[in-house]
Image (tube, rainbow, N blue to C red):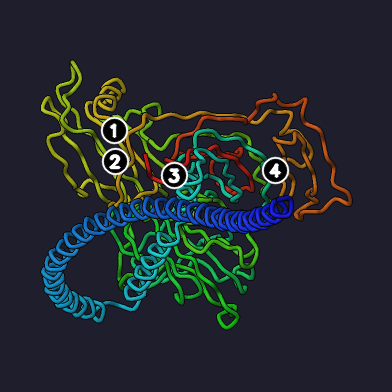
Amino acid sequence: MSADTATQAAKRAETAQASAETSATQADTARQGAETARQQAVTAQNAAKISAAQASTAAQQTEADKTITAGYAKTAKTCADSTAADRQAVQDMATKVTADKATVADHAAKVAEDRTAAETAAQTAQAVADSLPDDYVTAVGKIAENTAEIANVKLTDKELQRRVNALYSIGQGITHQFETDTDTAYQKTVPTGAKLMSVKNIGGRSIVFNQIFQPRKEANNGATVTADSDGMITINGTTTASYINFRDVTPEQNKVGKYAFKLLILNNPDSISMKFSFLNRSQSTPAITSGSSAVIYNQTQSEISLGKATGISGFAVGTVFNDVKIKIQIFDLTTMFGAGNEPSTVEEFEKMFPADYYPYNAGEIISAGTEEIVEQGKNLFDIEKCVSLVPYYGFEIDTNKTLKIALKDKKTCPTGVSFGIVYIFHDNTMANWLITSKGVVGAITDSSTMVGATQVMVACYPGNKETMQSIADAFDIMLVDGIYKSDTMPAYAPFHRNEYPIPETIKALSGYGIEGNVTDYEAKTYTQNNTIDGTAIKALDTPIVTDISTLIPDDFLRNIEVEAGGSVIFKNSNDNYHIPVPSEEEYIVKLSEVGGTT
């Protein structure tokens, strides 16, 4: 039994061992399955993560695509709108081109018409020119030359460059700026947009003034000629030739250089046409019967020859002179200003020397020391200058001006004034405005009453200052210099004039007004570089600098109110010498007015 029992136990042990081994195998299998399941779970989890990330990315991409798509849609709409606008613009341009074609056709027709008219006019002018004497042909050519010169001046006006610069500065946010004027001049125009001016410095100017004509007092070619100490030449008698010589050319007139010569007719009851001939009629002033005429002449080496004469010509043999009174002047411009610096036109010369006549002067140095700064508005209608011109009341104006006058219409005469007439005379023309209770009734041009080609006068009737002032106030009468008939009158501004005299202590400084000496009102110093020794300017070995801060107020010539289009004048002690002086002024300028934006 024990053996049997042991055998059974062994079998049971074997069975248990087998079961244990089976359980172990199953457990290992289960473990492996669990590991496999775990790995699969991890793999699935990772795959899920990847899918989630991909899904998130896809969602984001989808949203971005939606945004882009919306942008594309908006752009497409904008393009569609632009296309519609472009279509309209193209249509407008087509319409404009059609209109322009019609305009061009009209212009072409007008050009052809104008060309035909111009050719006809040219033929007429040529026929007239061919029929004129040489002197008149020369005068016509000179007029054309001067006209071209005027056109060039207008084309090179620096105001255009100022406007361009101002517009650029405005674009940079700049509203005001400083501008300086360093031109040498007797009178300067206040620039557009200027509000305040400060004079920084003023220099001296010296010239060798001369007037080198003296008449000979004797009978000549049938005429009797007398002359007084004031340069007045009186002519009587019947001529036996077509010219009257007054004297031979003198050595001082017989040199290479530029000269100005002038004829002034003061009495000519029979209206004899005459001209002043220089160097035996090789060069003459324009022929006139009254007033004055002048010319600038450049004398060359080949024209120098002693024995030639100066006189008058332009009339027929047998002309009767009945107490004709004239004055003649010759100026050596090269001696006066230096070679290359002479005035180029009569107008330029006469702006500096506006008097009708200057007595004989062989050549003396004249220094233009500024004694007064005058700031004046652009309106020259100065009632205070009026004098009694019975039955009128008015004033004469500098003859070297280009004037234009304007009156405000649709007004009535002031109380107590039944009517008035305002006249302006200039260059043998007269315009008058009849002013009644209905306003400015009419403007008339009439030269029949003119005496003298250079007379300039403004007057009114009835002849009293009060009436003239009331008319001027009621009708905003404005008289402006320096503009042409085709130019637009500036906006009305009342007449004003302010004078700033230079202190006596400044004028008393040694060498004041001599060329090269400078008064600096900004630095408050006076620098003397030169002195005059006899008839020549002499440079100092060492400049003398003087402190003038105690001689002038701190604000002297600082921040002076100015009017654009007005003027600044550097007056010396003699109103017959408008000699340009070097100076520097600084302006505060409003750029919007320069650029024309306001």
Residue at (74, 45) in percent of width and height: 517
Q: Image height check: is 588 above or below 595?
A: above
Residue 283, by quadrant, is: bottom left
Picture quarter with the C terminus:
top left
* Cα distance in 3D space between marks 1 and 3: 25 Å
Disc on the earlier residue, 4 or 2 = 2
Q: Amino acid at mark 2?
A: Ile
Disc 1 vs disc 2: Cβ atoms closer than 8 Å? yes
- Cα distance, mark 2 to mark 3? 24 Å
190 lies left or right of 322: right
* Whether label 4 touches label 2, CB < 8 Å: no
Mark 1 sits on what residue? Answer: 477
x 13%, y 28%: residue: 436
On the image, the x and y values in percent for residue 260 come to 51, 63
Mark 3 packing: few (<14 Cα in 10 Å), some, or many (20+)?
many
Whether the residues at callouts 1 and 4 have beta carbons within 8 Å, the answer is: no
Q: Viewer-nearest of labels 2 and 3?
A: 3
Query: Which residue does the numbered mark 3 point to in the structure image?
Result: 594
The residue tagged 2 is: 405
Q: Report how far apart the C-alphas of labels 4 and 3 lie in the structure.
A: 34 Å
Q: Residues within 10 Å of mark 1 (few under 14, many from 20)?
A: many
> Which tag, 1 or 2, sits closer to the chain's start?
2
Counting from the top left corner in percent of width and height, residue 453 is at 32, 52
What amino acid type is highlighted by mark number 1?
A: Ile
Query: Relative to residue 570, is residue 301 depicted above or below?
Result: below
Q: Amino acid at mark 4?
A: Gly
Mark 4 vs mark 2: in front = 2
Categorize mark 2 by other alpha carbons within 10 Å: few (<14), some (14-19), many (20+).
Answer: some
**Residue placed under numbered mark 4 in the picture:** 513
Describe the element under mark 4 as helix, strand or loop: loop
